[in-house]
């Protein structure tokens, strides 16, 4: 059981996503239903196809959702092949559950939908004191997501029905005490072992590859020694930064903007403060909150006697690791940047003052106001800020207007960039020897992974057409086209012979290592006293001692009917190992703890869910045609 869960971590993560719908419900299920475009088929479920266009749009929707919920997050991390492939897997999961709910004819009552909605954490802020939803705020929140209450509630009804598909298995899962004992005893059983490792590096001096060996190896691995396909390209970029740099402001507009924003400028006073935080979350018990309050009060009492000790006290006591190392310094901040209790207290202090205890959702703060940066009402002094803001406003407006034109022109007139360059006054840029393996660089938009994939598609290579407009970053669109293509070609043996010789050398050394290991195993079985083994270590499936996985598995599977016992383990490219199992140690008492047994029951239910989901996929003939990226496969 635990081996299954350990070896299928990614599947476990997927199942958790399936089971936690309320966290995502306000944003819909990837929004894939709105897009039924034709295109390459990347997956099918119950005879219904998922196209590449739907997949791309769902990925964009997820990135948009993450950007909206966490504005400061680097969305580039979601552009990796593994993350994008995860979106496709979730689309398949959703359709499998949706189809299963329909086949099972699952119905969801209005009361069940209302109960599910009331349990969504994202709606907690719009509830009345009696716990009911504020209907007006509810409608406003949904409207901001482009939904009406009817659309949202129908979507929620479908999601609850899908949840019922897996809940039936979760709630009916049964485990028996004897079953738990066997599994836990097996997982936590400890064995004393000794090992000997025979690695290729130990036999390099004995491995002497002949020319015939080198030629034979090269002939068998020719496809691995090819130059990567590459291309010379040209590309065009539409970015907010470039538009902003080319904007020249009118003096009259700048003064008018100043006059219109006097109130805003006045409100931009910034304050600098240091603080000491003693953690006490809203979920903490009353006793823990009281302990935190008393600790914070004792620190405050000491600081009042010696205000100059504030920074030292922060370094020593503050539980905010980001500011503690800087003596509690938080730098300058304007209104709206801090939680309200903290902000109210900081803006009520005079420079140099130290507050009393200030309680927020994070705990108890002691605040020292260290500086005040007043907002200016003088036009000349405010000019740099005004110019930056007004340029940014105008640039955003222009970008919104130009983005659609950019996308249409590069797509509709795909044999040249001249139309888009002439219309939008952009520059054609070039890059040489571009390959698909280029590392993404935010300063070079053409290195975007999605753009390179489109650039090296069969259609782009054959017809030298423009790619579609790709979002290479926030407010940045790029399109590219191949001007000259260089296909992959075989590298002659003469050019890479030293590399091939080294590969053959390692291969022969590995073969010698395994032969020697197997020979020693037979020798030591006959004469155990001659075995040259490392010092004994205690091993279990839980504590693998950083040993190779298959070595641990074989050592723990070895028969204990007659100990000690010697076994051989092929370590693949790492060589060969001989393992001596000396004895089985008495089981740790933790295997009988109630907490551990409860974890096992939950893990068993999760494994049953995985099996059931696999059955549903097979029943509905769900398949993903797109190959999984290497980094995605490695996560499993």
Image: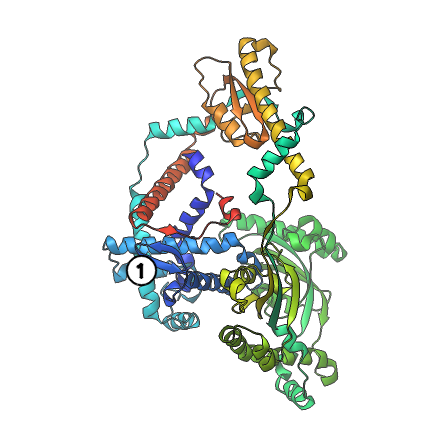
Q: Residue 577, position in %: x, y?
A: 56, 23
As drawn, 422 above or below 177: below
The quadrant of the rendering that contains the N terminus is: top left
Please name the residue shown 65% across and 42% down the image: 493
| Extreme residue in the right direction | 308
Residue 67 visible from this viewpoint: no
Please name the residue shown 56% across and 10% down the image: 528
As drawn, 624 above or below 372: above
The residue carrying pointer 1 sits among few (fewer than 14), some (14 to 19) or many (20 or more) residues within 10 Å by Cα, namely: many
Q: Residue 537, position in %: x, y?
A: 58, 22
Residue 125 lies left or right of residue 258; in this view the side is: left
Determine which quarter of the picture holds residue 534. Answer: top right
As drawn, 471 above or below 387: above
Determine which quarter of the picture holds residue 607. Answer: top left
Which of the two residues, 491 or 573, is positioned nearer the viewer here?
491
Which of the two residues, 324 or 282, is positioned nearer the viewer here?
324
**Residue behind mark 1:** 158
Please name the residue shown 54% across and 9% down the image: 526
| Extreme residue in the bottom direction | 252
Q: Residue 621, position in %: x, y?
A: 31, 50
Colouring scheme applied when the structure was drawn:
rainbow
Where disc 1 sits, the SS reads helix
Please name the residue shown 65% across and 80% down the image: 391
Determine which quarter of the picture holds residue 140. Answer: bottom left
Residue 530 visible from this viewpoint: yes
Which of the two residues, 418 or 498, is positioned nearer the viewer here?
498
Q: Residue 468, position in %: x, y?
A: 51, 68
């Amino acid at each position: 059981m635990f081996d299954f869960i350990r070896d299928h971590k990614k599947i476990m993560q997927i199942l958790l996503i399936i089971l936690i719908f309320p966290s995502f419900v306000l944003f819909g299920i990837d929004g894939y239903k709105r897009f039924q475009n034709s295109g390459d088929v990347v997956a099918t479920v119950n005879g219904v196809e998922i196209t590449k266009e739907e997949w791309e749009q769902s990925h964009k929707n997820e990135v948009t959702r993450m950007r909206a919920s966490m504005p400061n997050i680097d969305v580039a991390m979601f552009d990796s092949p593994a993350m994008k492939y995860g979106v496709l897997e979730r689309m398949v999961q959703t359709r499998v559950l949706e189809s299963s709910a329909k086949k099972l004819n699952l119905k969801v009552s209005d009361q069940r939908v209302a109960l599910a909605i009331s349990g969504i954490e994202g709606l907690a802020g719009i509830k009345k004191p009696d716990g009911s939803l504020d209907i007006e705020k509810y409608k406003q929140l949904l409207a901001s997501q482009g939904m009406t209450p009817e659309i949202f509630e129908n979507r929620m009804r479908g999601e609850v029905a899908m949840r019922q598909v897996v809940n039936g298995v979760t709630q009916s899962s049964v485990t028996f005490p004897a079953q738990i004992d066997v599994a836990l005893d097996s997982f936590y059983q400890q064995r004393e072992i000794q090992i000997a490792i025979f690695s290729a590096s130990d036999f390099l001096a004995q491995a002497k590859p002949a020319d015939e060996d080198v030629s034979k190896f090269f002939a068998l691995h020719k496809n691995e020694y090819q130059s990567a396909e590459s291309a010379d390209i040209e590309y065009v970029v539409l970015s907010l930064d470039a538009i902003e740099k080319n904007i020249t402001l009118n003096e009259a507009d700048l003064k008018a903007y100043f006059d219109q924003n006097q109130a805003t400028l006045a409100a931009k006073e910034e304050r600098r403060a240091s603080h000491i935080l003693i953690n006490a979350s809203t979920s903490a018990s009353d006793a823990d909150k009281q302990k935190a309050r008393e600790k914070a009060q004792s620190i405050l009492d000491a600081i009042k006697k010696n205000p100059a000790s504030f920074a030292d006290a922060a370094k020593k006591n503050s539980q905010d690791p980001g500011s503690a190392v800087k003596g509690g310094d938080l730098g300058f901040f304007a209104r709206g940047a801090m939680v309200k209790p903290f902000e109210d207290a900081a803006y009520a202090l005079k420079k140099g003052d130290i507050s009393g205890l200030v309680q927020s959702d994070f705990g108890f703060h002691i605040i020292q106001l260290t500086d005040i940066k007043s907002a200016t009402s003088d036009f000349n002094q405010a000019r740099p800020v005004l110019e930056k803001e007004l340029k940014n406003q105008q640039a955003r407006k222009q970008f919104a207007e130009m983005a659609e034109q950019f996308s249409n022109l590069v797509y509709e007139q795909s044999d040249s960039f001249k139309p888009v360059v002439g219309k939008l006054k952009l520059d054609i840029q070039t890059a040489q020897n571009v390959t698909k393996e280029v590392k993404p660089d935010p300063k070079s938009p053409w290195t975007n992974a999605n753009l390179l994939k489109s650039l090296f598609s069969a259609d782009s290579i054959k017809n030298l057409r423009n790619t579609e407009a790709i979002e290479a970053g926030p407010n940045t669109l790029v399109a590219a086209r191949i001007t000259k293509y260089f296909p992959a070609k075989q590298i002659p043996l003469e050019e890479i012979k030293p590399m091939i010789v080294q590969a053959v050398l390692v291969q022969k050394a590995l073969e010698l290592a395994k032969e020697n290991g197997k020979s020693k195993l037979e020798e030591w079985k006959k004469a155990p006293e001659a075995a040259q083994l490392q010092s004994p270590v205690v091993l279990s499936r839980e504590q693998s001692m950083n040993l190779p996985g298959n070595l641990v598995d074989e050592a723990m599977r070895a028969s204990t009917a007659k100990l000690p016992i010697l076994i051989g383990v092929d370590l693949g490219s790492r060589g060969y190992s001989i393992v001596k199992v000396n004895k089985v140690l008495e089981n740790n008492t933790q295997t009988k703890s109630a907490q551990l047994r409860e974890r096992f029951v939950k893990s068993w239910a999760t494994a049953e869910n995985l099996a059931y989901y696999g059955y549903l996929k097979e029943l509905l003939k769900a398949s993903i045609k797109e190959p999984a990226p290497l980094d995605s496969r490695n996560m499993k």
